[in-house]
Image: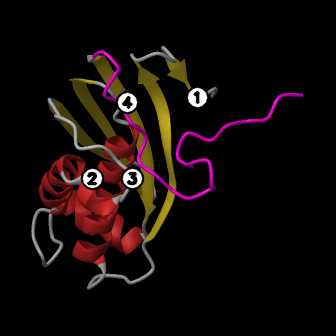
């Protein structure tokens, strides 16, 4: 069996940033999803718009978009790329807020980390905004659900 070469490690086993200089820019997209599980009290306040800190969904949406654009500042080995589009959707389900981020670029590397960062920070914003109503809100299930473009092509998480 051949040895697996990890691209983020050099020959000595030290972390490094992968050199993408030789790659051609292509259109790439990633979709990530996560949830904030909330109590019935929080969900009622979200539906009625009575959370004391204000419009939770608007704040979380903007926080997620801003986070997607700042991913390389947070993840040391992430490349600085042009984020050409970022959509963060928040949906109120029965006992949770479902957050979906779709991030697009036309660059040399993918946007999976940007989509995950967008969902994670949007979820943190939800928790920050509702903690005065109920501190039990819980972030769960943050994951990439689809990606397209680049050398590895399209991928979708099985249901």
10 Å crowding of disc 4: few (<14), some (14-19), many (20+): many
Q: Which residue is mark 2?
A: 71
Residue 85 on the magenta span: no
Q: Which residue is mark 3?
A: 77
Mark earlier in primary sequence (1, 2): 2
- Residue 100's image quarter? top left
Mark earlier in primary sequence (3, 4): 4
Q: Secondary structure at mark 4?
A: strand
Mark nearer the viewer, 1 or 4:
4
Mark earlier in primary sequence (1, 4): 4
Span shown in magenta: 1-24
Q: Secondary structure at mark 2?
A: helix
Q: What percent of the width, then of the height, locates residue 25? A: 26, 18
Mark earlier in primary sequence (4, 2): 4
Residue at 30 percent across and 33 percent down: it is 102
10 Å crowding of disc 3: few (<14), some (14-19), many (20+): some
Cα gap from disc 4 to disc 2, whole angstroms = 14 Å
- Residue 131's image quarter? bottom left
User: What numbered label is drawn on residue 157?
Assistant: 1
Q: Secondary structure at mark 1?
A: loop
Mark nearer the viewer, 2 or 3:
3
User: What numbered label is drawn on residue 30?
Assistant: 4
Q: Secondary structure at mark 3?
A: loop
């Amino acid at each position: 069996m051949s040895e697996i070469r990890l691209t983020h490690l050099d020959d000595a086993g030290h972390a490094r940033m992968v050199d993408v200089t030789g790659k051609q820019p292509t259109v790439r997209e990633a979709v990530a999803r996560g949830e904030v599980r909330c109590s019935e009290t929080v969900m009622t306040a979200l539906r009625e718009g009575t959370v004391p800190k204000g419009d939770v969904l608007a704040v979380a949406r903007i926080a997620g978009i801003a986070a997607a654009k700042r991913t390389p500042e947070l993840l040391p080995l992430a490349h600085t790329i042009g984020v050409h589009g970022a959509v963060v959707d928040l949906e109120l389900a029965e006992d949770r807020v479902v957050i979906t981020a779709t991030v697009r670029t036309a660059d040399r590397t993918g946007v999976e980390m940007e989509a995950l960062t967008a969902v994670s920070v949007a979820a943190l914003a939800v928790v920050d905004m509702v903690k005065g109503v109920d501190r039990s809100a819980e972030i769960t299930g943050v994951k990439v659900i689809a990606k397209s473009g680049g050398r590895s092509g399209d991928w979708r998480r099985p249901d």
